[in-house]
Image: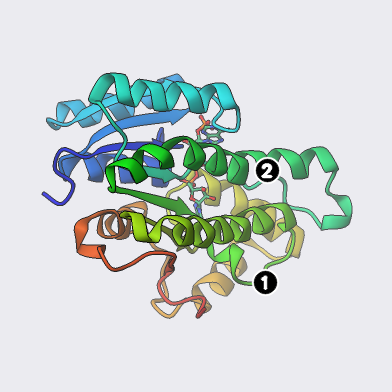
């Protein structure tokens, strides 16, 4: 087991990539504190983990709000003593539109969920990690934070911001036993985010779903979309001692799409 007896907070873990990471981390021996705004999905994820013999609890709430962040950290400590791993995964894409049509409210909401939340949680868990000289933070960014795609200015800015937060935090605690990294998934199969994004994007680009799929798959060396489980496998590696020499990095899990 790669994460035996670690305690992990994973945001946005009721479905999709976050759920896959939670289930995989639990199988690797970690106790998982789940979070999202939809209790039913959290309950289902917690049940699945417990039925497989793992440990899980959850906190319902908007992770962009300080009160949810405080509750998450307090619950993890009360339940299991400390926080060893933080995965900032919760994210929203927002509407697919040119930046000239984006409202300031939409911009603020996307930045709050995708970036402010990660800052708040990182700030909350780092002091104890530094004191214990042990801890790992993983930010789920996106290839949108590195590459140029249209109609997603706020999303792309939030994901690029996550990469900057990753490097800065890693630089501040690199000599104190704490590692901070990011994963940049490409378009992941079977996630609500991509299921909603695909139709919106094809409509905006004036092409069919099939044509969009051809464009996307044609840009990926593997010629297929990746899965939440493949993102989770990379997350286990980066959060385990196998990655003890890796910090401040952003690893693409995109089947060969973006090359920086
Ligand atoms: N799917 C892709 O193709 C793709 C590609 C690159 C990067 N990513 C990134 O991967 C991460 C996971 O995305 P996904 O594809 O798994 O999407 P998803 O299926 O839509 O899941 C997103 C998760 O985040 C939660 N969430 C959203 N807003 C939240 C908030 N304010 N507070 C707490 N939880 C919140 C959602 O639950 P509630 O709505 O119930 O709160 C859900 O559990 C995101 O950061 C996304 O940007 C995804």
Q: Say whether residue 176 is left or right of residue 192.
A: left
Local SS, label 1:
loop
Q: Which residue is mark 2?
A: 110
Classify mark 2: residues with Cα within 10 Å, few (<14), some (14-19) or many (20+). Answer: many
- Identify the residue at image location x=74%, y=59%: 151
User: Residue placed at 60% from the left, 27% from the top?
Assistant: 65
What is the quadrant of residue 104 in the picture?
Answer: top right
Closest to the observer, 97 or 181: 181
Provide residue 46's location: percent of width, then percent of height: 29, 26
Q: Is residue 94 left or right of residue 65?
A: right
Q: Residue at x 42, y 22 (%)?
A: 59
Where residue 44 appears, as percent x and y from the top left, is 32, 25
Q: Note whether 73 is above or below 260 in the view shown.
A: above
Q: Is mark 2 within 8 Å of ligand 1?
A: no
Q: Residue at x 65, y 63 (%)?
A: 208
- Up-down relation of residue 254 to residue 122 (above or below): below
Q: Marks 1/2: CA distance?
A: 18 Å
Would residue 80 be visible to someone looking at this image? yes
The number of discs equals 2
Disc number for residue 148: 1
Q: Are marks 1 and 2 in contact (CB under 8 Å)?
A: no
Q: Using the rendered view, name the quadrant where residue 108 is placed.
A: top right
Mark 1 or 2 closer to N-term?
A: 2
Camera-nearest residue between 74 and 64: 74
Q: Residue 38: horizontal and vertical position, in percent? A: 48, 24
């Amino acid at each position: 087991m790669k994460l035996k007896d670690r305690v992990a907070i994973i945001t946005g873990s009721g479905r999709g990539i976050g759920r896959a990471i939670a289930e995989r981390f639990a199988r690797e021996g970690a106790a998982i504190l789940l979070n999202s705004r939809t209790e039913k999905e959290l309950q289902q994820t917690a049940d699945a983990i417990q039925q497989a013999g793992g440990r899980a609890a959850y906190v319902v709430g908007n992770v962009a709000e300080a009160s949810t962040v405080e509750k998450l950290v307090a619950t993890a400590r009360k339940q299991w003593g400390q926080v060893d791993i933080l995965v900032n995964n919760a994210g929203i894409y927002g509407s697919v539109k040119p930046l000239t049509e984006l409202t300031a409210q939409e911009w603020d909401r996307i930045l709050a969920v995708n970036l402010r939340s990660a800052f708040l949680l990182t700030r909350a868990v780092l002091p104890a990690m530094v004191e214990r000289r042990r801890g790992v933070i993983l930010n789920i960014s996106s290839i949108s934070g590195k590459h140029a795609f249209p109609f997603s200015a706020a999303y792309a800015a939030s994901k690029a911001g996550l990469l900057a937060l990753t490097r800065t935090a890693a630089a501040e605690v690199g000599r104190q036993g704490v590692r901070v990294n990011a994963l940049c998934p490409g378009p992941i199969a079977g996630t609500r985010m991509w299921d909603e994004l695909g139709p919106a994007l094809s409509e905006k680009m004036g092409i069919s779903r099939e044509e969009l799929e051809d464009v996307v798959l044609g840009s990926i060396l593997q010629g297929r979309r990746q899965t939440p489980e493949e993102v989770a496998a990379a997350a286990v590696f980066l959060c385990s001692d196998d990655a003890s020499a890796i910090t401040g990095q952003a690893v693409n899990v995109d089947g060969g799409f973006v090359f920086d």
